[in-house]
Amino acid sequence: MLFLCTPNPPNQVRYITTMNIHPTAIVHPDAQLAEGVEVQAFSIIGPHVKIGAGTVVGPHCVIDGNTTIGERNMFFSGSQIGVLSQDLKHGEDLVGTTIIGDENQFREHTSVSASTMEEDVDDHRVTRVGNSGLFMASSHIAHDCHVGNNVIMANSVALSGHVDVHDWAIIGGISGVHQFSVVGTMAFIGGMSRVVKDAPPFMIVEGNPARCMGLNMVGLKRRGLDKDQRKCVKDMYKIMYRSNLNTTQALREIENSVEDCNERSVFLDFVRKSARGITK
């Protein structure tokens, strides 16, 4: 089948104006593929899969389970999306739901496991990925994870089950994140880190086990935070990590001495909701 595609800048997904399925691909007749979807050689699309317009499924990919994928995503060779989780407590009859947004790139051999149950209970029984993420080669998003928008996971990063990663977070290569941990917005996880507690927003966390090493100042500037906003974050860092106060005392001091701003609200809310405790 002939198809047309418009020229595209580097690192952007092609938008294909006519659906194109390679003759060696296996697409279940019940799968729902929108206009502009391309499925390349030897890929398999399951019966309960929905794929939005302009998404490209590269060669040797498997997209299965109760999976809904948005528009203009790119899946490179060997990606495994919406497949049965690797949790031994759950059998093959408990393949849950996977929801992926728009304009993500899943590089070679990435894997995204389905949630462990069908029901969406307070959004905690869905494996969910937002928009505009980059998931580099061999990265893994386990069952029931929630990954936000504009997240970058470098090569061989592994998220355990029930991990939350907030918008604009970056996780360096060959890092692992413990079950039920949370990575805050604009946090930066250094390569080869073992993250066993929550990584606070705006901070750099690295090591084995991971420790907070300072502010993600480069990330804050890239996200457009002005001088006053960055000062607010710096003041919170000094109180939480350099004042010899415990976490409860530091929260109280931040409330009393740091000027009210959105970043303060985000940080305080994150720490207070932390179930595993924050990385110190």
Image (cartoon, rainbow, N blue to C red):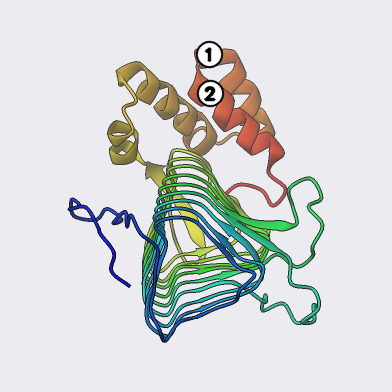
The residue wearing badge 1 is: 260
Q: Which sits in the foreground, 3 or 140?
A: 3
| Helix, strand or loop under label 2 | helix
Q: Exactly how many numbered labels are in the figure?
A: 2
**Which residue is situated farthest in the front direction here?**
1
Amino acid marked by disc 1: Asp
Give how far across and how far down residue 240 sits, in percent.
Answer: 54, 34
Q: Which mark is residue 106?
A: none
Left or right side of 91 for 250: left
Residue drawn 35% across the image and 16% down it = 228
Residue drawn 48% across the image and 42% down it = 167
Can I make out residue 246 in this image? no
The answer to whether marks 1 and 2 mark residues whose Cβ atoms lie closer than 8 Å is: yes
Q: CA distance from mark 1 to mark 2?
A: 6 Å
Residue drawn 34% across the image and 34% down it = 220
Residue drawn 42% across the image and 86% down it = 24
Q: Is residue 13 above or below residue 116?
A: above
| Helix, strand or loop under label 1 | loop
Left or right side of 78 for 196: right
Give how far across and how far down residue 137 sits, in percent.
Answer: 37, 72
Can I make out residue 167 in this image? yes
On the rendered image, what quadrant is the N terminus found in? Answer: bottom left
Amino acid marked by disc 2: Arg
Q: Which sits in the foreground, 8 or 84?
A: 8
Q: Is residue 43 above or below residue 150?
A: below
Q: Which mark is residue 264?
A: 2
Give how far across and how far down residue 196 sits, in percent.
Answer: 60, 61
Q: Sort mark 2 into few (<14), some (14-19) or many (20+) by Cα contacts within 10 Å.
A: some
